[in-house]
Amino acid sequence: MARVKRGVTAHAKHKKTLNAAKGFQGRRKNTIRAAKAAVDKSMQYAYRDRKNKKRTFRALWIQRINAAVREFGLTYSAFINGLSLAGVVVDRKVLSEMAIHEPAGFKAIVEKAKASLPAAA
């Protein structure tokens, strides 16, 4: 039976791991055992943080909208309530961008939301 030499495959796998570990510090960038552990952990962080990124951006949009509507005498929750009562369906990302780049359009949306809110007693 012919002899099978497996060095090529092993070197390719090691090279792939070490390339993924570029930029790491110390032994983590050039020792296969340490690099593999570091790369595996970094992949876990990347997967987790792709989910957290969505959460973080939504929080940022909410803060921006809140700051923008307070100039018109509303709070964020009252504004969102007014939008839903008015039947305006615009997501928070777009509202945030409008508040920054199109103040006139944002003001019109705020006025529509304000008008649909019941008068404060």
Image: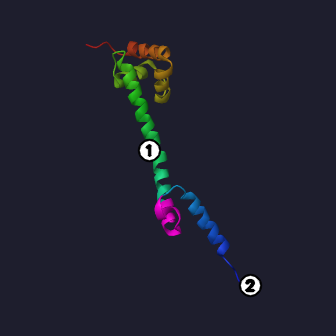
Q: Residue at x 47, y 45 (%)?
A: 51
Q: Residues within 10 Å of mark 1 (few under 14, many from 20)?
A: few
Where 48 falls versus 36 (above or below)? above
Where 22 falls versus 87 (above or below)? below
The front one of 20 and 3 is: 20
Say left or right for 14 vs 83: right
Secondary structure at numbered mark 2 = loop
Q: Quadrant of the N terminus?
A: bottom right
The front one of 73 and 3 is: 3
Q: Quick check: is 33 in the magenta stretch?
A: yes
The number of discs equals 2
Q: Position of residue 29 (x, y in %)?
A: 52, 61
The front one of 70 and 89 is: 70
Q: Quadrant of the C terminus?
A: top left
**Sequence-first disc among 1 and 2:** 2
Q: Which residues are magenta?
A: 25-39
Where 55 falls versus 85 (above or below)? below
Which residue is situated farthest in the bottom direction here? 1
Residue 52's tag is 1
Secondary structure at numbered mark 1 = helix
Q: Residue at x 44, y 44 (%)?
A: 52
Residue 6's tag is none
Q: Position of residue 117 (x, y in %)?
A: 36, 16
Residue 2's tag is 2
Q: Quick check: is 29 in the magenta stretch?
A: yes
For the residues labelled 1 and 2, say whether their Cβ atoms are less than 8 Å apart: no
Q: Residue at x 46, y 29 (%)?
A: 92
Give the distance between the C-alpha atoms of the residues marked 1 and 2, in whole angstroms. Answer: 52 Å
The kind of secondary structure the magenta stretch mainly shows is helix
Whether residue 81 is visible: no
